Image (cartoon, rainbow, N blue to C red):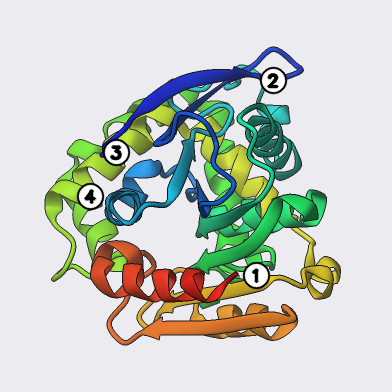
Amino acid sequence: MFKFNEANFFKTDDNEQIFYLKNFSLFDDTKKTLVFNYGLVCSNHHWKYQVDFFDANGYQILLHDYRGHFQSSGNNNLSKITFSQMAKDVKNLCDSLGIKKAYMLGHSMGVNVTLQITKDYPDLVLGMILISGTFMAVSDVMFDSNIMEFITPFCLTGMEKYPELMKKVWSSSGFNPIIKNIIHSTGFNKAKVSKEFIEIYLNRVGQLGPEVFFQLFSEMMKVNISASLEKMNIPALIIGGQKDNVIPNHLQRTLASLLPQSETYFLLNGSHVPQADFPELINERINLFLQKQT
């Protein structure tokens, strides 16, 4: 982890506690600052290789847990776990730390969070690194089909009728070899990402519970930010894996076409999590992008 490490909590205006971790004592506006936004029921574990690299290369880094996630509070008020509220939390957290400008990195759902931050607080964002995400409602595009329109109501009915059973199945997913193999094969490059990485991921998914997943998935199903993209006139790097089975590349190319200052980088054998598949290549490409910015 960081050479210098400071963990703390930020209290929101509605009395929730947002956990954060940073690698600097006092904010230095002469250095580039990176804020990492992870994906749907993921964690900062997905940024493991990027955090180590950019810390070693002198960047200021801010990691955080969304409200309702892990060490942050708020999971008792699901209705407030929304993209707009999460964006507000990040903005207020940055304000509290003296961060006036930063580069936002988002993976998967973290792309939605990053776009929301840029839409609502444009003065905060110097540039965006958007990995394996989309600006469209996922019910129409996930797995390059509308299958989630049919699966989601079935799961929600199960949550309503058999909540304890659903929670038990959800929390034990990290111990199920069939589920581990499915996630490993469909979401990652199996040859590049270890079983241990998948186990950590699934165990952390189990900590959150299905309620948070379906609350945020409902946010992703109704997202409508396309009209704001042309106003985001800041540098953007869109990254994808050419073997992404979750969010197909044509959606990322469409996103790039709608942002005024964008460039793309697609990895030949990259999955939905290319930053874990090929961390050295991803880190070098992001660093090149950042070094070009003044």
Cα–Cα gap, marks 1 and 3: 39 Å
Could you tell me residue 62's position as x and y percent? 48, 40
Q: Residue at x 62, y 60 (%)?
A: 149
- Work out which residue is located at the far front of the displayed protein and give it: 30
Tag in front: 1 or 3: 3
Q: Is residue 292 left or right of residue 112?
A: left
As helix, strand or loop, the secondary structure at mark 3 comes to loop
As helix, strand or loop, the secondary structure at mark 2 comes to loop
Could you tell me residue 100's position as x and y percent? 69, 44
Which label was assigned to residue 245?
Answer: none
Above or below, comparing residue 66 to residue 10 in the picture:
below
User: Three-letter amino acid code at disc 1?
Assistant: Asp
Which label was assigned to residue 198?
Answer: 4
Residue annotated with mark 3: 2
Q: Is residue 96 left or right of residue 3?
A: right
Q: Quadrant of residue 146?
A: bottom right
User: Three-letter amino acid code at disc 4?
Assistant: Ile
- Work out which residue is located at the far top of the displayed protein and give it: 15
Q: CB atoms at circles 2 and 4 under 8 Å apart?
A: no
As helix, strand or loop, the secondary structure at mark 1 comes to helix
Tag in front: 2 or 4: 2
Q: Residues within 10 Å of mark 3 (few under 14, many from 20)?
A: some
Q: Is residue 4 left or right of residue 162?
A: left
Above or below, comparing residue 57 to residue 226 in the picture:
above
Tag in front: 4 or 1: 4
Residue annotated with mark 2: 12
Work out whether mark 1 precedes mark 3 in sequence or the reverse, and give the earlier one.
Answer: 3
Residue annotated with mark 1: 140
Q: Residues within 10 Å of mark 2 (few under 14, many from 20)?
A: some
Could you tell me residue 229's position as x and y percent? 78, 71
User: Three-letter amino acid code at disc 3?
Assistant: Phe
